[in-house]
Amino acid sequence: MMATATETNTVEAKLREASDKNAARRLRTTGMIPGVLYGAKKEPRAIAVDPKQILKILRSGSGHNTIFDVNLDGQLDKAMVVDWQYEPLKGSLLHVDLKRIAMDQKMRLSIPVHLEGDAKAAKEAGGLVDLVLREIQIECLPADIPSHIAVNVTELSAGQGIRVGDLPKSDKVKYLNDEDATVVHITYVREEAAPAVDATAAAAPAEPEVIKKGKTETAEADAIGKDAKKK
């Protein structure tokens, strides 16, 4: 099953003058953030957008693969979020890059894998579901971009797995990964046996430690602390 990543969201954008960091800070105090709109063989534009609208898209089921409308001075363009920057401490959105999308041209992008169902092996002792490929590389038209690729693991038993070649086929979406690449498989965690202990040796009393008399030498070492530098 593939759910489309196309949404009906509209991001309202305003033109701004490309400027320095101080101007960007002043813009953020108004509740807007700086951004750039480019692509589709059109002139790049420095824009200001509402971070709430961008976060709504990034937090949606299709995330940054969502295609939406950008309204700039009454001109609507289909676009995607291709890059964004967060403030490291507060986690607030600082900047966003939007790319115009030509709906009649195929794109290459990564789509997340979502596992569905409970594998038979998960109910068996030691059975673990190991997701090897968390994303699949695909090629398709923008309108056909799936929000995710669903992989059903219900029937998987010990030693079984699912390869890229086993994924649901579609005449609209082409998988670019090797067909033999493993997407998910079942592994087991084996318990290591404890080393055998000689019963006779275990029952024998331990010999007392012999302390030799005589002069002992002690060596003093200076501890050297090294401060870890963070970038």
Image (cartoon, grey):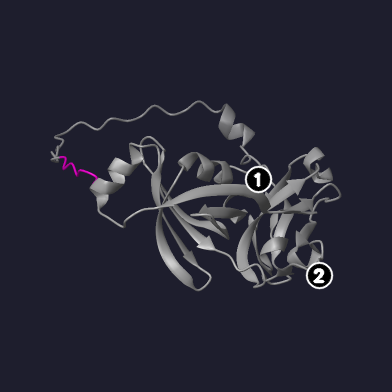
Query: Vertical placement of 17 versus 105: above or below?
Result: above
Membership of 79 in magenta stretch: no
Instruction: Using a 10 Å C-alpha cutoff, classify the residue at mark 2 as few (fewer than 14 neighbours), some (14 to 19) or many (20 or more).
Output: few
> Mark 1 belongs to which amino acid?
Gly
Quarter of the figure with residue 137: bottom right
Q: At x 25% / y 53%, what residue is drawn?
A: 20
Q: At x 54% / y 28%, what residue is drawn?
A: 204
Quarter of the figure with residue 15: bottom left
Quarter of the figure with residue 79: bottom right
- For the record, the magenta segment spans 223-229
Element on which disc 2 rests: loop
Element on which disc 1 rests: loop
Q: Is residue 162 left or right of residue 216?
A: right
Residue 152 place in picture, x, y as percent: 81, 50
Q: Is residue 107 visible?
A: yes
| Label 2, label 1: how far apart the Cα atoms are | 23 Å
Q: Is residue 223 left or right of residue 23?
A: left
Please state, as top left, top right, bottom left or bottom right, where the N terminus lies in the image: bottom right
Q: Which residue extends farthest front?
A: 74
Q: Earlier in the sequence, mark 2 or mark 1?
A: 1
> Mark 2 belongs to which amino acid?
Asp
Residue 229 place in picture, x, y as percent: 23, 47
Residue 88 place in picture, x, y as percent: 36, 41
Q: At x 77% / y 57%, what residue is drawn?
A: 161
- Label of residue 171 in the image: 2
Label 1 sits on residue: 61
- Label of residue 83 in the image: none
